[in-house]
Amino acid sequence: MKITKVTPWLIEAPLSYLDTADDDKDSGVMREYLFVEVSTDEGITGWGEVTAKGTRARPICAGLKHVSDLIEGDDPRLIEKIWNKIFRAYTFMGSRGLTTNMISAVDIALWDIRGKVLGLPVSELFGGPVRDGVPIYCHPKNGSSVEDTAQHARAIVETGQKAMKLDPFVPKHEEELDGYLTGKLSAESENLGVERIAAIREAVGPDIELMVDCHGRFDVPTAIRLGRALEPYTLTWFEEPVPVESIHALRQVRENVGVPICVGERHHTRWDFVPVLENELADFIMPDVTWTGGISEIKKIATMAEAYYIPISPHDAGGPINVLAGAHAMASVPNHYRVETWRARLNSYDVMIDHPLDIRGDKIYLSDRPGLGIEMDKDYMRAHVIEGYGG
């Protein structure tokens, strides 16, 4: 079997905003999804994904056309060899970010192909699962009011979910709107954010796991002040309190707050996690399987973290391939915490895949179908592809 082509598909499809049991319709909000198809000369196709949209997605699509030329004719069984072939091809221009985004999509697709060839789910290829269902968490919406946000959180609990996360610190600092990261936060946003978390904690009770995402936005004094303000609400973690570039800033925050720290969304490959683990800078790590290097790499990162007894929780801000790739990788990981998902229900994904995701309560259940367990609907994708970016 030989690889014949790598095809990026940048499509526009509904965003999953289904929160409550009586909300049976799409919200009407659309977003871009970037899926990657790896074709072979025997007709078996694998699917990957990169979480990217807008200006981030276009260069990835262009890069994947070069990757297609690079690996055309290669044996898709040789997943590790192909991973390194792509990685080393781009070391002179930077082996993180764009490079690992492209690698991730191809790697996920190659594992999908391998599972289909063997007639086994991807989760069976790593020694078999250690759990029946893979735990997940989801997001409430920041509502039009504090009470509205709390109501979204209550609705999530009613679906059987047991963990949720949000970034409560909006509106952003006005200078951020121009793309400039000041690291600051207005007093209004700070107080409103803490009020949101207090309301959610009161609404869902003490047993629901609650996480706060800072999206790497704040300077050290702001992050410390926010972390301390959130201490009374028993957070599972305080995520990315400072930008990723400085482990020294992360250390300052960690040493001055009483909440667990989680980082990793903006870390790429196992090498980026070495200083985090060696310097004891996080209680949880959260690499994104579509950014850090695919299923191959997130499994290696999980094993590294296991040696430090640090839980791993794959980040997800994308579509169904992102969710499933993370879940298959984590099915056999002892130190897995939860896989991130957009919402308590992900019905909006159904229009683009041939088999709905099986989410019950706070777990996703993997099917016994080979590979990742789904096929993308090519007719839907052709109808929704962004001109010039797929097919």
Image (cartoon, rainbow, N blue to C red):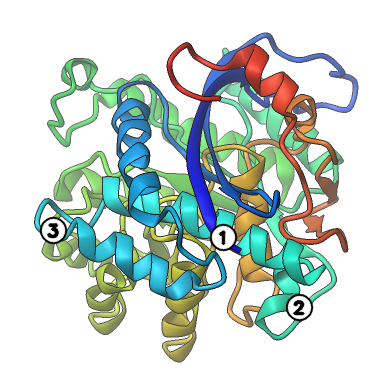
Task: Residue under label 3, please give it.
Answer: 246
Residue at (45, 36) in percent of width and height: 167
In space, the residues marked 2 and 3 are separated at their CA atoms by: 36 Å
Callout 2 amino acid = Pro
- In which image quadrant can residue 347 be found? top right
For marks 3 and 1, give the one nearer the viewer. 1
Secondary structure at badge 2 equals loop
Where 322 falls versus 269 (above or below)?
A: above
Task: Residue under label 1, please give it.
Answer: 110
Q: Which mark is residue 129?
A: 2
The residue lying toward the viewer, choosing from 246 and 72, is 72
Task: Return the x and y of residue 81 as percentages of the image width and height.
Answer: 40, 74
Where 23 falls versus 290 (above or below)?
A: above
Secondary structure at badge 3 equals loop
The residue lying toward the viewer, choosing from 331 and 234, is 331
Q: Number of marks in the image?
A: 3
Res 128 visible: yes
